[in-house]
Every structure is written in structure tokens, then in C-alpha cells.
Image (tube, helix red, strand yellow):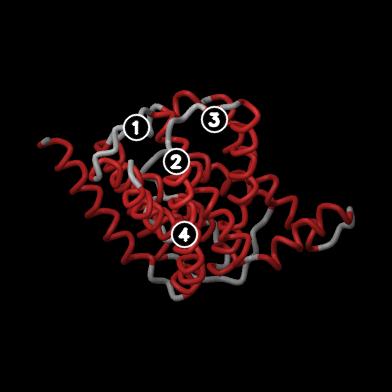
């Protein structure tokens, strides 16, 4: 992978992390189209770096909310900030358990399995279509909702399942306010990504790759910048109930991916 490829993939990640079209799925498609032949561990390293960039863009856009979460955790008062913080922690549990016990199996899926990605994009399309038909409410995310949304986030580890699409759709289908659903979806992933990076650093997994620093740096920078724009845009899209457009896109992308992989 060269610097130009890294920039392209960084932009793809930054846009698709927040838009409900599966960032991991599009990264795998992008790598395949660009001829990236990295082994799964190296491919996963680049993916983790790009996700770290979009996590940072989330922190920047929602800096006030992030500050409230930390404030709520360390105040130990039963106020709204503390309750919201507990919901974020609760939502992390399913994905953390999946990542802890099935890490090797997950890594094997990030190696250009385009047919699998295609089918998962179709699943994402179905979720988005169902969510778009749901009525908007003023209901906030409850504790039980937070855990169910966390399960959706765990399933969305699979390449081709949109994390934001799965979590926002699940939240909306549970009857939650669409804007609050999007806000919760974006904030819940930040500690999970940071925890994953910390674990890999401690294990030494991120030091085993031969990917150059310049490639990683360019990918990080482009992903961060694209993420800033996409995060703000996505809030507006969810509020205006325009998820059906992304459902159509994911369905078409899934069919094309399966067809191309099959005929090749």
C-alpha cells in the first residue's frame, strides 16, 4: 500500500464510519479494488488506525458530551450525566466480550472476503429501510435499550454491517428519538475503539506490521478530516429521516459486490 492508497482509504473510512454504509465493508472493498494484498494482521492494523482517527473526530464534534460523560463518571452522583455514562458503559459490554473471545476469528474476516461483505451490506440495507419507516419520538435511550444497542454494535464488527447504521436503526426501532439515537451511537463507540487500541498496544499486536509510518499517518489524517464533516452531516440526515437513500445504496453495493466477486 502506498500513500495515495492510504489517503483514499482514509477518506472512505472517515465518510463511511458515520454514514450508515459500513466503514469496514467499504474498506475491504477499497482494499480489493486497490489491490491491497496485506495479510489479515496488517490489514487489521490499518483498519484500527483509521478507526482511531474517526474516534478522535467524534470526540472533537461531541467534546461537550464527552466532557459530561467523564464528569458524570467521576462525580458519583445519581444525576443525568452519571446515568448517561452508565448507559455508555453498558452498551460497550457485548462488543467488548466478542472482541475479547473471538479476536482471531474476526481478524480472518478482514482479508478481502467480498462475497461475505456483499451479503452483510444487504443486511445493513434492510435495517436502514426498517428504521426509516419508524415514527420519530421524544423517548430517550433506556438502560435495556443501551444493552440491546450494544448487541447491535457487537454484530456490526462484521465487515459489511454498518456500525452506525445498525446501532441507530436498532435504537430507532426500539422507539427512541432519532437525534438522541444518533448521538448515543456515535458516543458509544469511542471508549470501545480506544480500549481496543490500548489492548493491541499492550499485546504488541500493532508493532508487528511492516506498514510504513507515512502510510499510517496519511490514512489517519484523511480519515480524521473526512470524519469531522461526515459526523455533523449524519446527525442532520437521521433527523430528517432520509435513511432510505442509504438503504438503496447498500443494497445495490451488496449486489454488485457479490456479482463481481462471483464472476472473478
Q: Do the residues labelled 3 and 2 touch (CB within 8 Å)?
A: no
Report, in whole angstroms, how far the alpha carbon at label 2 lies from the one at label 1: 10 Å
Q: Which of marks 4 and 3 is nearer the N terminus?
A: 4
The residue under label 3 is 207
Q: Of circles 1 and 3, which is in front?
A: 3
Nearest the viewer among 13 and 250 is: 13
Position of residue 122 relative to residue 199, above or below, is below
Mark 1 residue element: loop
Q: Which of marks 1 and 3 is nearer the N terminus?
A: 1
Find residue 46 and name its label. 2
Q: Earlier in the sequence, mark 3 or mark 2?
A: 2
The residue under label 4 is 18
Residue in the picture at 70% in, 60% down: 66
Residue occupying the far left of the picture: 263
The picture places residue 55, in percent across and down from the top left corner, at 57, 53
- Local crowd size for mark 2, using a 10 Å CA cut-off: few (<14), some (14–19), many (≥20): many
Find residue 38 and name its label. 1
Report, in whole angstroms, how far the alpha carbon at label 3 lies from the one at label 2: 12 Å
Amino acid at each position: 500500500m502506498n500513500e495515495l492508497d492510504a489517503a483514499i482509504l482514509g477518506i472512505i473510512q472517515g465518510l463511511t464510519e458515520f454514514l450508515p454504509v459500513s466503514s469496514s465493508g467499504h474498506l475491504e472493498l477499497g482494499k480489493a479494488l486497490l489491490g491491497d494484498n496485506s495479510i489479515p494482521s496488517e490489514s487489521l492494523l490499518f483498519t484500527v488506525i483509521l478507526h482511531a482517527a474517526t474516534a478522535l473526530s467524534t470526540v472533537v464534534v461531541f467534546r461537550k458530551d464527552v466532557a459530561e460523560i467523564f464528569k458524570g463518571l467521576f462525580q458519583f452522583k445519581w444525576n443525568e450525566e452519571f446515568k448517561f455514562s452508565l448507559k455508555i458503559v453498558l452498551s460497550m459490554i457485548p462488543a467488548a466480550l466478542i472482541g475479547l473471545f473471538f479476536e482471531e476469528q474476526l481478524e480472518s474476516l478482514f482479508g478481502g472476503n467480498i462475497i461475505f461483505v456483499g451479503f452483510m451490506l444487504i443486511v445493513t440495507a434492510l435495517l436502514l429501510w426498517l428504521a426509516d419507516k419508524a415514527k420519530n419520538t421524544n423517548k430517550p435511550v433506556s438502560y435495556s435499550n443501551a444493552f440491546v444497542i450494544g448487541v447491535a454494535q457487537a454484530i456490526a464488527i462484521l465487515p459489511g454491517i454498518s456500525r452506525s447504521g445498525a446501532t441507530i436503526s436498532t435504537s430507532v426501532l426500539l422507539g427512541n428519538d432519532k437525534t438522541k439515537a444518533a448521538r448515543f451511537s456515535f458516543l458509544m463507540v469511542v471508549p470501545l475503539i480506544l480500549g481496543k487500541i490500548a489492548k493491541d498496544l499492550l499485546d504488541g499486536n500493532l508493532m508487528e506490521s511492516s506498514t510504513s509510518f507515512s502510510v499510517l499517518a496519511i490514512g489517519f489524517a484523511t480519515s480524521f478530516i473526512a470524519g469531522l464533516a461526515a459526523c455533523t452531516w449524519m446527525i442532520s440526515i437521521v433527523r430528517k429521516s432520509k435513511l432510505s437513500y442509504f438503504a438503496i445504496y447498500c443494497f445495490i453495493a451488496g449486489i454488485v459486490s457479490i456479482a463481481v466477486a462471483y464472476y472473478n
